[in-house]
Image (cartoon, rainbow, N blue to C red):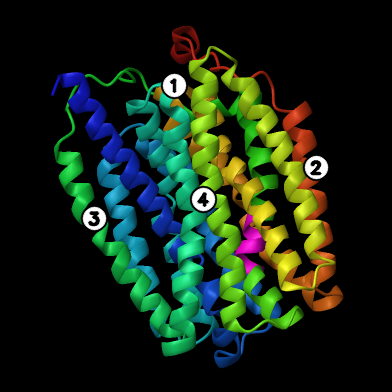
Amino acid sequence: MTATGARRGVASGLVFLLGAAVFLNYVDRGAIGIAAPLMKSELRLSEEAYGLVFSAFFWIYAPVQMFAGWLCDRFSVYKLMAAGILLWAGSTFLMGFAGGFASLLVLRIMLGVGESISFPGSSKIIARHVPPERRGMANAAVAAGIALGPAAGTLAGGLILGTWGWQAIFFTFGVVTLVWLLPWRRTVRALPTTGYHDEGQRVPVGLLLSKWPLWSMSIVHALGNYCFYFLLAWLPLFLTRSRGFGIGEMTMLATLGYTVQGACALGYGHFSDWWTRSGRSEAACRRWMMVASQLLAAGAILGLAFAHSAVAIGILLCLAGAASASLSLNIYAVAQMFAGPRASGTWVGVQNAIGNLSGIVGPIVTGIVVQRAGYDSAFVLTAAIAAFGAAWWALAVPRIEQVDLGEEQLRHS
């Protein structure tokens, strides 16, 4: 095998493991939603208390993103990924011992610290090792992990919940996540130690914060995340409490939507790479994919407010999954296009920090709305936010191209 072929093979192994890491990320962070139908009553959590516990993950996860991204651009991103997974796997496992609101709160915060490395680290590695014409499928691996994590987590967690109880969900998921460290260590050892095309002066956070593209992407990231986290946090409770489905039916319906999301992510990645290789504008492709997907998300979420049959809900969840797949693929691919290899870790760290503020605010707002006005009102509000996200992609995200981080600016920053 040639040196180029060997390097490409190692890069492919890295991308596969990054997708697996994000898969486990969403399995573990979503475990509380799967456990909620039994855990809430056993631990005597109100709707507002549950929303607070779910959002606690984001209290630290969101702001720490900026520091995590900064670390990724300056230290070994491979070691940082391993340390983060070790921490979040341990936090997940310990949630099985939680005895009430306080312990759940602390462990969700610890989980947020561990998982904060995932997206800055993944974007840094993709920008470093993957060329533009393969960027779609590399980010599709991450996007598929975002979708298939909740799908597999909901399916496995629902089966565990019905047989062994909510504690066993956390024990099982925590142990499985630890296994990821074994192939990661072997793959990283095979990497070359020199020759990265992003070597050079690091980009200060302050310089990036002066760029409107970063702010515009951070805002639209928050708008998209609000919709995704709304379904991740509240779908199991909505299906069981508001629509009267059993745990088994809830598990199948939620898993269906996430499975479609994962399949669409891979399809979108293949399509966007084909588009780019053909000489067409990658920027235009990604922008208008996002406009269309946000409108689709708005329609699907609004429809759920009025749907009652399993067939109608299943179809709408598939449409919502297809829309979410585009978000999880393009939000990071566009960030990598704006930042370039040298600044991608810091850029995605800042963008994810602001983008995940909706994970703090959203579950609390939804808990209040559900408790006072019912689930239907919460779905209408979320649909309106998705529609606003479509308008933002069309009008407020500037021309998608690498921002100017010239040496003159760096010398004076």
Instruction: Give the CA separation, mark 4 to mark 3.
Output: 23 Å
Q: Secondary structure at mark 1?
A: helix
User: Front-most of 308 and 77?
Assistant: 308
Q: Which mark is residue 262?
A: 4
Give the mark, 1 or 2, whose residue is nearer the N terminus: 1
Q: Secondary structure at mark 4?
A: helix
Specify few, some or many for label 2: CA neighbours under 10 Å numbering under 14, 14-19, or 20 or more. some
Marks 4/3 in contact by CB < 8 Å: the verdict is: no
Q: Is residue 115 above or below residue 334?
A: below
User: Which of labels 4 and 3 is toward the front?
Assistant: 4
Q: Position of residue 304 (x, y in %)?
A: 78, 63
Q: Position of residue 173 (x, y in %)?
A: 37, 70
Q: Which residue is mark 2?
A: 388
**Residue pointed to by mark 1:** 133
Q: Amino acid at mark 4?
A: Gly
Q: Which range of residues does the magenta coloring cover?
A: 228-234
Q: Which residue is mark 3?
A: 181
- Please state which amino acid type lies under the numbered disc 1: Glu
Q: Which of these two is toward me, 121 or 305?
A: 305
Mark 2: secondary structure: helix
> In this image, 360 relative to 99: left or right?
right
